[in-house]
Amino acid sequence: MPTSGSQVRSTHTLPEILSQPQTWLASQCEVAGDPAFQAAQNRLSAAPEILFVGCGSSFYLAEAAAAGCRLLSGKTTRALPASELLLFPNLCALDVPGLKIVVISRSGRTSEAIRAAEMLTKNHRIETVGITCALDSELAKVCDVTIAVPSADEHSMVMTRSFTSMLLALLRLATPTASAQFPNGAIESVAAALSAKLPSLNDRAEAFVSVHNFADYIYLAQGPFFAVAREAGLKMTEMSCSYAQTYHTLEFRHGPKSIVAPQTCITFLLSEAGMQAESEVLVEMKELGGTIVAICNRAPESVRRAGDFLFELEADVSELSLLAPFLVLPQLLGFHTGVKKGFNPDEPKNLSRVVILD
Ligand code: F1P
């Protein structure tokens, strides 16, 4: 535990988390007016298969984008950490005809991401699309086309609004023409719905953290929400030095549930498609004594009864539009847990903003 009293109070992370609704709108305007975005859309629309690549949060972002892109476009999509392309290229199926690769890096400087993009061009002659929050980035020098979303960048070390803004941009990238699964106006709808609830949600999150002392943090989700749950767990770990584990919701019954107790905080990111099956797990974990955080668009009565902390977005949007807003409460819980434990979430222990290798 850090020494109390000597802590510099966090100044960036919370405002950046709370700025997400307006940042989503600003970043969407940025990409809509960016010729690189259109060029990237043209390149990817012709690809039979797309591989998304990143490191850390940007790898989880790659996973979320791959799931969303597959559901939106019907293309074959995959996600890998950049390190896998560097160390085990023969495991990465890089010989798929027409394969295009999206390299994701908030900083545009992460060594593994840059080296992977260079290797793809030089050794495999595979077209690469970069996406970053940095202007004039190293990434832009090594990718064929690079989208920049500078309005979404953060001063803080952990990725919060950069993750959700780049995710929305990647979902828009995968949907050249508006589709029922990600219609025009969806981002405006979720931004408005979240904006209206965010101040009270932050107060509720701080109060919830203040009255609980958890030993374990579990994040459960299915389908496209699973990668968002992985990022949610990383936020809790990065900002509060707490152990977090993520499972597919129904997988949790197959052994890991043995740890459930009142000091186990179990966060469910509930899909609409899987609500019946996922909510049954939620009720069972409540009956085992776990403390339940339920995140959904609209809660069935069983979830309303069992949840110790219930967040309903209540937006009339499609499933994929919920991926970004569902991450905001876990970011807030990670932030307030870190502050409660005496850390400064702006500068998490042991972390650097960018991993640069020699
Ligand atoms: C990737 C990353 C972040 C992590 C930390 C170190 O950065 O691993 O995901 O939270 O900030 O860097 P980037 O390639 O997206 O800039």
Image (cartoon, grey):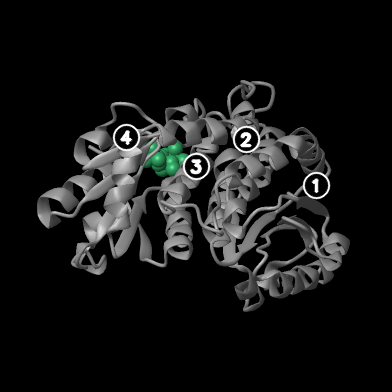
Q: Quadrant of the N terminus?
A: top right
Badge 1 element: loop
Quadrant housing residue 135:
top left
Spatial CA span between label 1 and label 3:
28 Å
Badge 2 element: helix
Badge 3 element: helix
Compared to residue 317, the image places residue 88 above or below, namely below
Residue under label 3, please give it: 163
Q: Are marks 1 and 4 in contact (CB under 8 Å)?
A: no
Spatial CA span between label 4 and label 2:
24 Å
Q: Quadrant of ligand 1?
A: top left
The earlier-in-sequence mark between 4 and 2 is: 2
Residue under label 1, please give it: 212
Compared to residue 88, the image places residue 24 above or below, namely above
Callout 3 amino acid = Phe
The earlier-in-sequence mark between 1 and 2 is: 2
Q: Residue at x 58, y 39 (%)?
A: 239
Residue under label 4, please give it: 35
Q: Residue at x 60, y 34 (%)?
A: 20
The earlier-in-sequence mark between 1 and 4 is: 4
Spatial CA span between label 4 and label 3:
22 Å
Spatial CA span between label 1 and label 2:
28 Å
Callout 4 amino acid = Pro
The earlier-in-sequence mark between 1 and 3 is: 3
